[in-house]
Amino acid sequence: MFFCARSFAQNADSESSARQSQVDNIVANYYTSIGDQSRLYNGPEYSFYPKMIKGIPYFTDTPGFTNGDVEYDGFKYSNLQMMYDLYKGSVVMQLPSKAASIELISDRVQAFDIYGHHFFRMDELNQTNGQNLAAGFYDRMYAGKTEFIISRRKTLETSNTASLEKYFADESDKMYLKVNGLYKGFGSKNALIDILADKKAELKKFIKDNRLNFSEEKEQSVVKVIAYYDQITN
């Protein structure tokens, strides 16, 4: 290993980067070598749902595995094959051998990334002046001075027809805004503006000028409004 630097600061940065790269490679090689014996795969075997149940219970309605990252027991694992079961609220991993799939123990999952979304686990939260939140995984959509998170779930329903078919249905996503240390729930543009009432006039103008469509692009519109709110507040 050698370093070429024009200044002490550059040399320090290069040294730190190279050292981190070495550590990452060592960790990656270690878990590759032990394969299915990794501590990551110590949960119960995951049972897939019967084909007779209609619909898809997984995040983004994708039934197959995709690359993702998981922080488990304080360790971060990258480029793993995984799915997020929205009905159970659990992360599902495929063994490197593809011999089986494992349901990670949720209490030991600190966070995970999948399809460009970052989910983190929160313990049950009771607030005196804010919204009470159930324990589980939350999709962090925006994190600045203000934070925007979403609880995503699916439910298992039974049809009203004579066939009594079971199917997975989208549960209304629960959206929360964290302002001044408190989470507050909202479900519409007006409710969002009410939470950020100190800049109501400016936000209404911003929404109008930028033609934000809360019907077609609700989550993206909320992110833009919050980012602007953070920009214009001290």
Image (spheres, grey):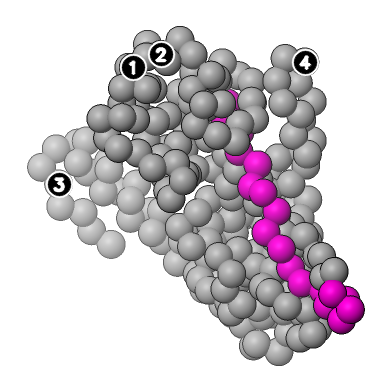
How many numbered dots are placed on residues in this image?
4
Is residue 56 highlighted in magenta? no
Which amino acid does the dot numbered 1 rest on? Glu
Gap between marks 2 and 1, in whole Å? 5 Å
Contact between marks 4 and 3 (CB within 8 A): the answer is no
Residues shaded magenta: 161-178
Question: Who comes first in sequence, dot 4 or dot 3?
Answer: 3
Q: Position of residue 165 (x, y in %)?
A: 83, 77
Q: Nearer the viewer, residue 102 or 220?
A: 220
Q: Mark 3 — residue?
A: 5
The label shown at residue 128 is 4
Contact between marks 3 and 2 (CB within 8 A): the answer is no
Q: Nearer the viewer, residue 70 or 36?
A: 70
- 234, above or below 80, in the image: above
Q: Mark 2 — residue?
A: 199
**Is residue 104 in view?**
no
Q: Position of residue 150 (x, y in %)?
A: 60, 43
Q: Nearer the viewer, mark 3 or mark 2?
A: 2
